[in-house]
Image (cartoon, grey):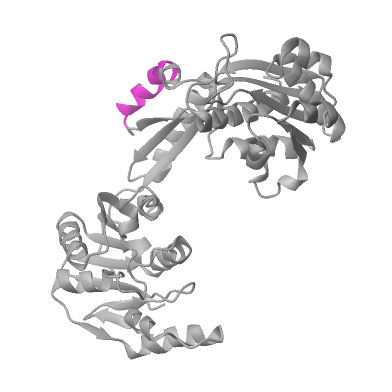
Amino acid sequence: MDNVVLPPLASAAVIAVGSELLTPFRTDSNSLAITARLDEIGIRLAHKAVVGDSAQGIASAIREAMARADLVIISGGLGPTSDDLTREGMADALGLALTEDAHLVEIIAARFARRGVAMPAINRRQAMVPSGARPIENPNGSAPGLILERADTTIVALPGPPRELLPMLEGLLAAGLGARGAGMPLRRRVLKMTGRGESAVDEIAAPIYEPYARGPVPIETTILASPNQVELHLSCRWADAAAADAVLDEASRALEAALRPACYATDGRSLEEVVGGLLAERGLWIATAESCTGGLVAARLTDVPGSSAYVRGGITAYDNRVKIDALGVDAALIDAHGAVSEPVARALADGARSRLAADVAVAVTGIAGPGGGTPSKPVGTVVIAATGLGRARVRTVVFNGDRQLVRAQSVQAALDAVRRLVLDL
């Protein structure tokens, strides 16, 4: 890719193009990835917009973005079909002509030829370039990007698929964009908690993080809460990156100490990654026995690359007969206490550990709803048991929410039970 010389850039606007992004069925994730990378080089996001597949709408969004930011990055709308209108929108916004780039036609045709097929005529649209714009090579797709400098604004258009957009963005950063950040880079730390609600976390955390907001190197703290976990995001914009890192590390350590044992990560890892790391470090094997979660705990564990080194296997025991036959749970135990009970949950975990020759096991049994609840065991009642290493952690929880939410909270609680068992918390 040609080197691109860019003026100093302090602020950015991101425009996500695609009518599908205006529906409930598709989420704009590109702007989040773009913003994270720009923050690292000191280019602050000043504006973000989502616009449908309309040349006029795209043009309007570009003009508004140019009034707000030094750098405008557009994602999507560079495909070959009639609803891919980012090129037309750029030309309209800037009053430029669109012309076919013969060299781009050759590049696109060669890409098809490498696959043994002729380039469809429709793909020639992807070689249309606004006057003065320069193409950006796309190693993973047929749609080239575009970069155009206009007055004090740099406009970049990238294809929508993340596997194409992200490498092209990295290429731009390496080619000059990364050295042109004129603002202060954003430094960040993220602490993740589970098993405590937002207000309980903030009651402990606020007296620690509030003084840092008024300190010589100020920190901004944001709390993000979901039914599964609470996150504390500590961020700092400061010219001296070492000073920012030092104060963020200091605050992070203080918060982690105060929030133990609920705090499971300060390095961005997911709970399944943390649990997997603990198991791998200790050479332990884990097994799962799941009723109401239907294999979701095992799925989370095995989402982590390399999990074959510590996940022995799992048994989804939805029917009581499977609990008895596959996991060795005593039928009398189920008759006496019910399938959703602490004795049965512990027996499920012990059975999985024994039958699958694991060091530790976790079991989940519950009533995810919408039916099946009773006055003594309402919908949302879940029992989680983790056993092994000569100890056990068994508890009953009543989760709020619909079936999907109850199951999601159950999985998070099960993974946390394993973490606490292994660490003997």
Identify the residue at image location x=25%, y=60%: 71
Classify residue 270 by image quadrant.
top right
Query: Residue 374's spot in the image, x, y percent?
Result: 58, 13
Q: In this view, does 198 lie to the left or right of 47?
A: right
Q: Is 214 contained in the magenta span? A: yes
Q: Is 54 contained in the magenta span? A: no
Foreground of the two, 5 or 336:
336
Identify the residue at image location x=56%, y=87%: 116
Classify residue 373 by image quadrant.
top right
> Taking the image as drawn, is residue 377 in sight?
yes
Instruction: Tell me if residue 197 comes above or below residue 117 in the rendering.
Output: above
Classify residue 238 by image quadrant.
top left
Foreground of the two, 344 or 191:
344
Identify the residue at image location x=55%, y=85%: 114
For the C terminus, give its image quadrant: top right
> Taking the image as drawn, is residue 4 in sight?
no
For the N terminus, give its image quadrant: bottom left
Query: Residue 211's spot in the image, x, y percent?
Result: 34, 22
Q: Is residue 206 left or right of residue 304?
A: left
Q: Please count the marks in the image.
A: 0
Query: Residue 262's spot in the image, x, y percent?
Result: 55, 23
Q: Residue furthest front?
A: 371
- Secondary structure character of the magenta stretch overall: helix
| Magenta highlight range | 203-216
Query: Residue 357's spot in the image, x, y percent?
Result: 86, 34
